[in-house]
Amino acid sequence: MSRAARALIFDLDGTLVDTVYAHVFAWQRAFAELGLPIDGWRIHRRIGMSGGLFARAAAREIGRPLSLTEVETIQRRHGEIYREILPERHPLPGAVELLGDLRAEGIVHGIATSGRRPEIDASLEALGVGEETVVVERGDVERAKPEPDLFLTCAERLGVTASDSYVIGDAVWDLLAARRAGMLSVGLLSGGYGEDELARGGAFRVYRDPAELRQSLDELGVRE
Amino acid sequence: MSRAARALIFDLDGTLVDTVYAHVFAWQRAFAELGLPIDGWRIHRRIGMSGGLFARAAAREIGRPLSLTEVETIQRRHGEIYREILPERHPLPGAVELLGDLRAEGIVHGIATSGRRPEIDASLEALGVGEETVVVERGDVERAKPEPDLFLTCAERLGVTASDSYVIGDAVWDLLAARRAGMLSVGLLSGGYGEDELARGGAFRVYRDPAELRQSLDELGVRE
């Protein structure tokens, strides 16, 4: 029996596309517009978790619950500001080539993101990800990261077990969700977390970005 | 002879005001406008170093030297975008109160920043820092962080020795410059670095933000 993982499950923002800092800034502006300043670093460390959890954590820092209207306004303004300040999406170095290699070599892989369609469509397009790739997004599951649902659903659609799957992510929420899904995980620095944060979060390897991961695929045992 | 430090020397961006993520995003846009995409996390990890070093590091990543005109254009656009997207400056939690305490208790302190007037003026105003506070900025020294010049000049103006000074900063450039100046340093997470990055950089204590530092002043031995 092979002990190699058979599938790679990727996070999207900060892992394959360089969108984290635009997201941070858009959230910061959206909160500030309602007179609710939140420190940038606290937003940064929460990118990639579910929107509901994010709003609850933000409310705790602001010191009072947010009304449903406030949450909706902040989410809408975040989306508007994000698309306004970042009309184009930049794949992270090596991301397009890595996905191309995986397709060419027939290595099973998918994407599982707390983001939603249509917001993520431009990122997928920039990556050259088409219909053939399994993409699980926020709307496909009940609970987003750090719950394991996104990763478990992705593995199911890929036809692999959790123990045959590696999660690749840039945030501790990816790593926590991976652990809860029973999957090993690999961390990337390209979302702006520090190496030790990712290692402590459970990543058994940490690479700079998709380019370094691509050069290191053999270390992961995904090739036969 | 007292072994307590007599003076606190503060970095500004990310240490006292919540400006790091706006700076990252403004640099990212300024580079992108010239068709030079640079990953957000790589910019983030260089905020606070001297502009000249920053441009050289960016050029290395882009893979070719930048012309003087390009550097000037990028710096000008960074400033314009920064002021456009962040018209107001938010002090980090506890920053205004901390500086107020230091003034009230007569604890010697100053600010030493790689930023320049007039760009930093709005931040100083938001902090309530007036003429009475020693502020050393980029224009006052030949070389910015991670060279020790800013901190050494600040200590000199405060009338204290390097060994009697603590540096408070959020970036590894602050911590490296502090070491080179012969000063102990304290790290703050409010600039978005991880705790281990700051500890490895030389910080002997790491706090979340100025509010936590304020509650912990006795640990630093700056009070008689």
Image (cartoon, coloured by chain):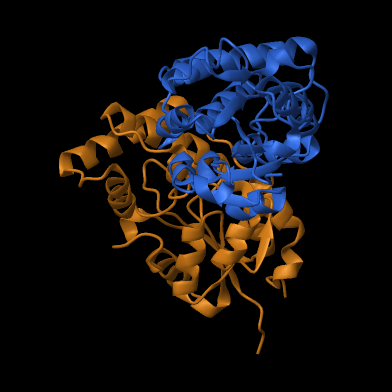
Chain colours: A orange, B blue
Q: Quadrant of the C terminus of chain A?
A: bottom right
Would residue A88 be visible to someone looking at this image? no
How far from the left and from the top, in percent, is residue B167? Answer: 65, 37
Question: Relative to the observer, which residue lies in front, B19 or A87?
Answer: B19
Q: Quadrant of residue A221?
A: bottom right
Count every numbered label the image shows and give the total. 0
Residue extending furthest toward the right = B65
How far from the left and from the top, in percent, is residue B150? Answer: 72, 24
Question: Relative to the observer, which residue lies in front, A203 or B127?
Answer: B127
Examine the rendered structure and indicate whether residue B77 appears above or below residue B207. Answer: above
Q: Residue at x 56, y 54 (%)?
A: A170
Q: Is residue B34 left or right of residue B17?
A: right
How far from the left and from the top, in percent, is residue B135? Answer: 60, 19
How far from the left and from the top, in percent, is residue A128? Answer: 57, 44
Q: Is residue A72 left or right of residue A122?
A: left
Q: Quadrant of residue A136?
A: bottom left
Q: Residue at x 60, y 51 (%)?
A: B205
Q: Is residue B124 left or right of residue B138?
A: left
Examine the rendered structure and indicate whether residue A189 appears above or below residue A156. Answer: above
Q: Residue at x 51, y 59 (%)?
A: A172
Q: Quadrant of the N terminus of chain A?
A: bottom right
Q: Is residue B102 left or right of residue A15?
A: left
